[in-house]
Amino acid sequence: MIGQMSRYRPPQPRSSAYITADGAERLRTELHQLWKVERPQVTAAVHEAAKNGDRSENGDYIYGKRRMREIDSRVRYLSKRLESLTVVDRIPDQTDKVFFGAWVTLEDEDGNEKCYRIVGPDELDPAKNWISMDSPLARAAIGKLLDDEFEFQSPQGLQRLCITKIAYQAN
């Protein structure tokens, strides 16, 4: 029908199924926390709230049920995601080349340097300069050698960068 909004959303591109050993451990810890700690607490709170009678106006009951759905949804996602991920827990043989898990220091044309870590999409953390291997910058850098120059399309336009350092241990 014309004028009505559709609920259809195009499928998201599949994210890469790689993760560092630390990242996998963080996901396992979150799964354990949700399933073994939070869910039993919320279940008990909902049970207590249900004893208070009219559930339609019982905020504790309504919030508890909503929180339980959120927990169950996240638990399902984490369980499936952890099964499908490949944990990369070794340093590559060629350490002068950019691969998954590398800390890469890049210099722009103005001489400004910035260090990024290339991680899986589940570990992405802009505050730490951890970028997804699926990002345009990471895709352009992967496979390059130390001192290689490359270009990539950023939101600010085409950028030319030079790889000044590659490390596979925390800086």
Image: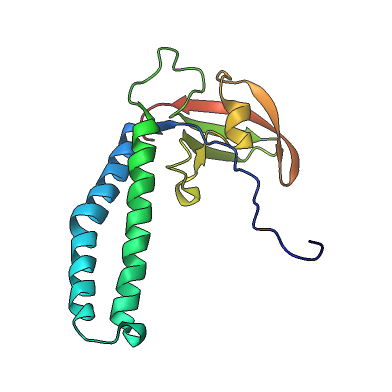
Can residue 23 be seen? no
Tell me: 151 left or right of 87.
right
Determine if residue 116 is in view: yes
Residue at 59% from the left image edge and 21% from the top image edge: 147
Residue in front for this viewpoint, 108 or 27? 27
Where 56 falls versus 3 (above or below)?
Answer: below
Q: Position of residue 156 (x, y in %)?
A: 73, 46
13 horizontally vs 66: left or right: right
Q: Against 148, is 93 above or below? A: above
The residue lying at 30 percent from left, 72 percent from top is 64
**Quadrant that contains the N terminus:** bottom right
Of 87 and 46, nearer the camera is: 46
Q: How many marks?
A: 0
Q: Is residue 63 left or right of residue 112?
A: left
Task: Please name the residue shown 55% across and 40% down the image.
Answer: 114
**Relative image position of residue 161 (x, y in whole percent):** 66, 31
> Outermost residue, top direction?
93
Q: Quadrant of residue 112?
A: top right
Question: In the displayed structure, would residue 137 be above or below residue 146?
Answer: below
Q: Residue furthest right?
A: 2
Q: Quadrant of the C terminus?
A: top left
x then y, percent, for residue 148 = 62, 20
Residue 109 position, x and y percent, is 71, 35
Relative to 118, say whether 95 is above or below.
Answer: above
Residue drawn at x 47%, y 44% as measured from the top left: 124
- Nearest the camera: 12 or 88? 12
Q: How is the image coloured?
A: rainbow
Asked where in the image residue 73 lies, by quadrant, the reply is bottom left
